[in-house]
Image: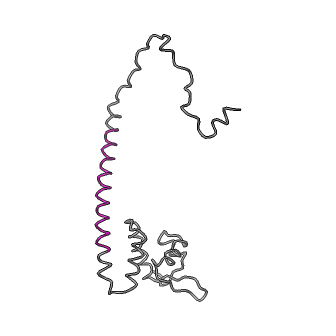
Amino acid sequence: MTSHLTITEVAERTGLTAHTLRYYERAGLIAPVTRAPGGQRRYAASDMEWIGFLLRLRETRMPIGQMQAFARFRGEGNATVPERWQMLEVHLTDVLAMIESMQRSAGALQDKIAHYRALETRSLPVASPPPERKRSASNPPPTSRPRPLSAGPGQAARNRR
């Protein structure tokens, strides 16, 4: 990997936008990035590794506030290893619970899909309509066009025309 990448190169490699990378820096998720003589950001390999880890935290739905706290602890050095370790332990517990819940939901979806496939393969006959009843004054024939239940937005104005 090139030792110092531009923001465009980092955006291409990570899938983040340049705007998001600048936001991550402002929000304290990324330490201030070194700059070229013209002021352009230059990302080192260590920056790329950290951004990769942030993407994993984001992918596992860690809230940005927790990501910021983790980044602050990281910036404080080895003295905060216990805090970072604890944060990751708690987050991992949440992620595993989310995975378990998603697996149950996926199972329910698979069951419902299998149910519909079974219905389709059985080719159930379409139910025939009920027999026609004799019409009387208390049982008039259906109108050709159902009336709306209520006027929607602008319906009253169209009806006045």
Q: Does the magenta stretch include residue 115?
A: yes
Depth check, front residue: 102 or 66: 66
Residue 81 lies in what quarter of the image? bottom left
x, y percent for residue 84: 33, 78
x, y percent for residue 32: 49, 83
Establish if 65 lies above or below 79: above
Depth check, front residue: 154 or 12: 154
The residue positioned 28% from the left and 72% from the top of the image is 89
Colouring method of the image: one colour
Establish if 40 lies above or below 60: below
Q: In this view, does 153 lie to the left or right of 112?
A: right
Establish if 148 lies above or below 137: below
Q: What residue span does the magenta drawing correspond to?
A: 87-116
**Quadrant position of the C terminus in the picture:** top right
x, y percent for residue 57: 38, 70
Q: Is residue 67 left or right of residue 19?
A: left
The residue positioned 47% from the left and 14% from the top of the image is 139
The residue positioned 31% from the left and 79% from the top of the image is 83
x, y percent for residue 156: 64, 35
The residue positioned 35% from the left and 30% from the top of the image is 123
Depth check, front residue: 69 or 55: 69
Q: In this view, does 158 lie to the left or right of 119?
A: right
